[in-house]
Image (cartoon, helix red, strand yellow):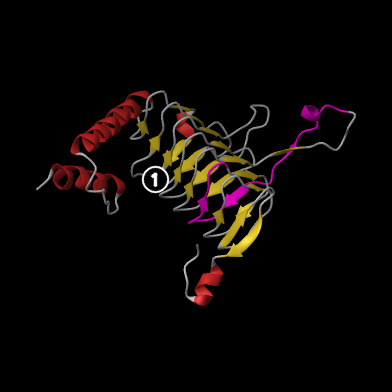
Amino acid sequence: MSFRTSFIVPLLEHLLRRPVQLDPDIPARVLLGRSLAVAVGLLRGMVLIRRRIVLESGARIGDARRFRTSGGLVRIGAMSRVDCTSRDGIVVGRNFKLGAYSRMIASGTLADLGKGIVIGDNVGISEFAYIGGAGGLRIGDDVIVGQYFSAHPENHVVLDPTRPIREQGVTRSGIVIGPDCWIGAKVTVLDGVTLGRGCVVAAGSVVNRSFPDFSIVGGVPARLLRSRADSLDTGKNAP
């Protein structure tokens, strides 16, 4: 029995509480190195915030008492910052992963605390993300997100041209991203947007309005390209 099947896979399945498959061509030394990195990250989380959370090198969680998890293997990537100061804090589900060099900022200012951020189970957000929570952000289960994602649940008021914009306040409607969405790299989602279940957002899109379940959208601003529900009617898979 190999090191992979006797130790690594059972350990991952225990931590993640789900079946795990590893490519047979991954060298054992790479798996061992990754496992040691996770172990060191877990130790860092236990020492710095006394929680079973993997904190990679340089990662930090501010106001950690407002950071709540549902278990599994929660990983905060290298040099990432999570600031939980807000009315409802930050809640992440099982097996959440935030990529390296990312930011999750629950409040944009201490003068008017934000609502917070809620993220479901098995959500992966890639590197260099900026995720705001001022007006409230909710991401459903099983969402996958590419690099350089940004979400901004807040807007500046600009109605009075005689006053500085920074003095006119903000509006906050919130953002909701439904379960099982795939959001490509360099996507920006703006305040007031709701994406339904199973949506696909093309890379580089700016989403400034809501779309129903199974929409495939893209562009600046994003528009509906087609519906994945059409594949259910024809019996074919979406491209």
Q: Position of residue 214 (x, y in %)?
A: 55, 63
Q: Amino acid at mark 1?
A: Ser
* Residue 38 horizontal side relative to residue 195, left or right: left
Counting from the top left corner in percent of width and height, residue 138 is at: 55, 48
Q: Quadrant of residue 95?
A: top left
Would you say residue 12 is visible in this rendering? Answer: yes
Write the start and end of the magenta stretch as one range: 163-186
Q: Position of residue 192 (x, y in %)?
A: 68, 49
Which of the two residues, 145 or 52, is positioned nearer the viewer here? 145
Res 212 seen here: no
Reading the image, the residue beneath label 1 is 70
- Considering only vertical position in the picture, is 217 above or below 87? below
Residue displayed at 51% across by 33% down: 128
Q: Which residue occupies the foreground of this view, 58 or 228?
A: 228
Q: Is residue 89 left or right of residue 40?
A: right
Which residue lies most toward the right here? 162
Residue that appears at 42% across and 46% down: 93
Say left or right for 197 vs 193: left
Mark 1 Cα-neighbour bin, 10 Å: few <14, some 14–19, many ≥20: some
